[in-house]
Amino acid sequence: MDYTRVTVHGSTHRGDLVVPSAEPLVTVLPRLLEMLSETSPGGAGVALTTSEGIQLDTERSLAEQQVRDGQLLLVVPADQTPPPPQVSDLVGAVTDRRSSSRGRWTLDTARRCVVLLEAPLAGLACWQAGSALPAATVTVAVVLVLLAIAACRAWRTWPATAVVSAAVGAAATVGAGAVAGSELSAAHPVLVPVASGLACAWLVVALAPGLAGGQRPMLATGAVGTVGCAALPALLAMGMGVTGAGAVIATAAAFGLGLVPAAALSLSGLTELEDAATAGRPPSRGTTQEAIDGSFRAMTGLTLALAVLAAGGLCLLAGSHPTQWGWGLACALGIVVVCRARFFPFAAQVVALGGVLAALVTVLLAATPLPGPLRGLVIAAVAAALALVLVKPVPEHTAARVRTWANLVELIAVIATVPLLLGHFGVFSDLLEVFSR
C-alpha cells in the first residue's frame, strides 16, 4: 500500500501525518480529526482544503486528487471554506504566463543566435574571398583574432563573445586553407584541412576568452581541443594510417573523460578553496558560488572538446574498414564513453556523449555489410528501447542495480582497450612472428 505524507493544520494543532494514498478521505478523516483534537465528531461540518483554497472531495483518495508528498492541508468548517481561486484578469494572466515561458524570444536569445551565426558567416566570407585575395583574408583573420583577444581582455560582454565567434570562424577557414596545398593534404584532402581548421578554432578559444579573459576553464578547453585536432595531421605525417590515428585519438579522449571532474575542480579553484577552509580560512559565499559555477563550465567545456575528439576518432577508426581488433576497440571505447556519461550531471554534457554513441552506431551500420531491411530493424529496435524507457521509468532499485553493472562493464571495457589497441597496431602478430622463428 502506498502512503502520502501531508502536513495538516487544525484550529489549534498541526501535525505531519502519513495517510493511505488510495483510500477515500472519508475513511481516515475521523481519525485525523481525533489526532488534531478537533471538535467535530465524525468529521461532520468539516472540510479539507489546500493552501490555494481548493476543497478536497472526501469521497475520493489523495492520489485521485493529485495531492503530493509534503503538501499542506487545512481543516476548516464547511461553511467557512474559501472560494476556489479564480482568474478575473485574463490579460494579466496571459502576460504573466508569457513572461515565465521558457520558449519566449528575448534579448539574450537574439544575442545567442547572433553569436552562433558569427562563426559560420565569418568563415564563409573568408572562404569566398580567400581565392582572390589570400593575403587580405589572412590579414583580416589575424586582425579578428587580435580584436577578440583585446575584447576579452577589456570586458566580458556579448560584443566580445560575438568578436570571438567571428574570429573562430575566420581562423578555422584560414587554417584549413593554409594546408590545402601541402603534400599531406594531397594524400588526405578532407581530413587534414578539417583537422587544421578545427585546431585553429580551438586555439582562438584558448587565447581569447581563456588566456586574455582569464578564464581557466576556457583555456583548458581550447588547449585540449587544439592538441587533439592537431594530433591527427601530426600522426598522419609520422606515417600512421587513418585507422591508427583514429584509434589513438579516440582512446586518449575516452580515457580523458575520466579526468574531467578532477580537472574541473582544480581549474575552477574549488580545490584551493577547500584547502583554505580546512586550514581555518573559509571563503566568502560569493567566491564559493563563482568557483562552483566555474567548475560546471569547465566540466561542460572539457566534455564537449573530448566528445568531439572521441566522435571523430571513432568515426575514423570504424569507418576505414579496420581489422577485427579495430572493430573490438571501437565497440570497447563506445562502451566506455556511454558508461562514463552517468558521472556528468548536465544536459549539454550528456547530449555530447550521446552524440559520440550516435556517431559510432551510424558509422558501424554504414560500414557493416548488412542489408537495408536488417539495418532498419536495428534502428527500429533502438528507437523502441528509447521509447520504452520514456514510457515506463526505471524504478530506483533497478537503476541502482544498472549502475552497479555499469561499473563492472566499464571496468571490463577499459581493461580490454589496452590489448585491443595493441592488437590493432599488430603488436601481437609481430610478437608471434618473432617467437616463431
Image: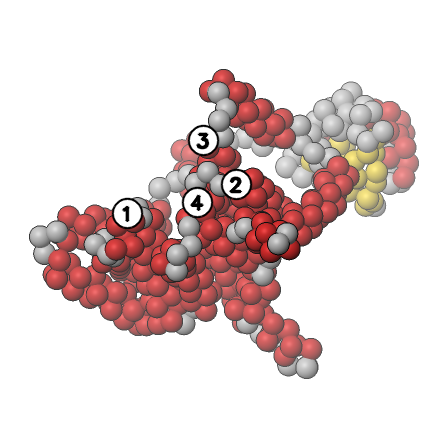
Please state which of the two labelled residues, at mark 2 or mark 4, is closer to the viewer.
2
Q: Where is residue 201 in the image (x, y as percent from the top left)?
A: 32, 58
The quarter holding residue 391 reads top right
Please name the residue that numbered disc 3 is placed on: 366
Q: What type is the residue that disc 3 sits on?
A: Ala
Rounded to the nearest angstrom, the CA distance separating label 2 from label 4 is: 13 Å
Identify the residue at horizontal 35%, vertical 47% (top origin).
Answer: 109
Residue at the disc numbered 2: 323
Q: Which of 149 and 63 is in front in this view?
A: 149
- Under circle 1, the secondary element is loop
- Decide if residue 64 is on the left or right side of residue 115: right
Comes first in the chain, label 1 or label 2:
1
**Is disc 2 in contact with disc 4, using a CB cutoff of under 8 Å?**
no
Q: Which element carries disc 3, helix, strand or loop?
A: helix
Q: Indicate the position of residue 6 as horizontal and vertical percent values.
A: 77, 39
Amino acid type, residue under disc 2 in the picture: Thr
Of discs 1 and 2, which sits in the foreground?
2
Nearer mark to the viewer, of 2 and 3: 2
What amino acid is labelled 4 in the image? Leu
